[in-house]
Image: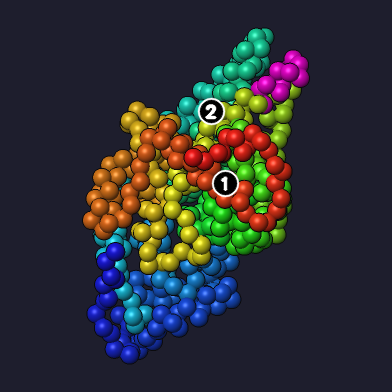
Amino acid sequence: MAEPVRTATMPASSKDEVGGADVRMISSDELRKHAVADDLWISISGDVYDVTAWVPHHPGGDIPLLTLAGQDATDAFAAYHPPSARPLLRRFFVGRLEDYAVSPASADFRRLLAQLSSAGLFERVGPTPKVQVAGMLLLLCAALYCVLACASAWAHLLAGGLIGFIWIQSGWMGHDSGHHRITGHAALDRLLQVLSGNCLTGLSIAWWKCNHNTHHIACNSLDHDPDLQHMPLFAVSSKLFGLWSYFYERTLVFDAASKFLISYQHWTFYPVMCFARINLLVQSAVFLLSKRKVPQRWLEIAGVAAFWIWYPMLVSCLPNWWERVAFVVASFVITGIQHVQFCLNHFSSEVYVGPPKGNDWFEKQTAGTLDIQCSPWMDWFHGGLQFQIEHHLFPRLPRCHLRKVAPFVRDLCKKHGLPYAAASFWEANVLTWKTLRAAALQARKATSGVAPKNLVWEAVNTHG
């Protein structure tokens, strides 16, 4: 990898561009000393900002700032904020970084980001949101008809599946609206988030944002990225065993129970994904009832409560308990497709321990993600996740542009010798299964915990 390109050497003090006042010059060593919640500095484009007072008010939550505290955060800031956010930083300005440097990969990333912004791609969302809303309403009407107007058990089962497809589309809409404006109006976006997320699926959009923003900032960091912390059920690496989670603020315990479950994880993965929705519902509820700061907490709670009113009522309209159970299972199993998709993009990619470094944003995002190769007519199925590398580099970019941007990202990766991983949907599943199996074998050999002996296990995993 090429060495960072240092900016022109600056004197020990310089004049502020705005007021002509002397500007304090700050070293990287000094910047690193300000990396806690009550004393938090970051550097953006060589300027140093004291954002301590802003941490509780940051729209993206406090965790992204805490994760990048005491270091350069230029690429992460540029990826997540429009250019109009730059002037807002001036009130936090404390000085300039005297040893500021930019890697060639970061320089090219910023250049491409500026080109996409100049082309207006971040503002053009296309017809996708309107098509999604229309499709969800159509599916909902069909599901209601099958339940309320049909006596066939097969129609009732179909209705459960349709609800599952609605939840999948709701997930894509929540994902899009959480990253960028899909209507052009913040209040309308917020309304769609609560209606399509909290009310329709029972998942808190506030919980999702907290979880997902952390995932993006610390992509595939074993101790910082919550999307890799699924113990005791799953582990993509033995390094997770007993690791401290900075997101959950607890140790990922590797005891006898977790060792047993992880030892079988490559067989239990797909069955568990069929009911992974239960985990998200529980996490949403725990988050909303926790002491964490939740924007518009009561609106979030009211939206989730609405789900727990309409969904059980719909289920109760079915004639017997067998059909009710089948309806719920069908809706959860169909949605399990999306939960598998979430895992394919990261489980088999490179992982690391520790916080991300702001000056290798491009490198970390490309190394920790996997694109799914598919034809354009299948883009609806993947909801934008098929271009996961591009999405992680440009999270504000509407998904209708990701396919156009992919060749430019691929060229940049090739230019700088960085991985650009892509696989078919089937190949991605195989890679994920192999990753889980490798970690399962490592868990089997681990000294912590005691897993019961099983002859079937030994036979299936015989080597040589």
Question: x, y percentage for residue 260?
Answer: 68, 45
- Depth check, front residue: 364 or 117: 364
Residue 361: % across, % down = 38, 61
Whether residue 277 is visible, yes or no, is no
Seen in the image, is 60 located left or right of residue 447?
Answer: left
Mark sitting on residue 165: 2
Q: Secondary structure at mark 2?
A: helix
In the image, 234 versus 464, the foreground residue is 464
Residue matched to label 1: 441
Q: State yes or no: residue 456 in magenta.
A: no
Compared with 65, 270 (above or below) is above
Q: Amino acid at mark 1?
A: Leu
Relative to 48, does residue 437 appear above or below in the rendering? Answer: above
Mark 2 or 1: in front is 1
Q: Residue at x 35, y 33 (%)?
A: 374
The part of the image, by quadrant, that contains residue 316 is: top right
- Residue drawn where x is 60% and y is 35% of the image: 459
User: Looking at this rendering, what residue extends furthest in the front direction?
Assistant: 464
On the image, the x and y values in percent for residue 150 come to: 64, 10
Q: Which residues are magenta?
A: 317-328
Q: Which mark is residue 116?
A: none
Task: Name the main secondary structure of what is drawn in magenta.
Answer: helix
Is residue 162 left or right of 109 when viewed as pictured?
right
304 in relation to 103, above or below: above
Q: Does label 2 or label 1 sit earlier along the sequence?
A: 2
Q: Residues within 10 Å of mark 2 (few under 14, many from 20)?
A: many
Is residue 373 visible to us here? yes
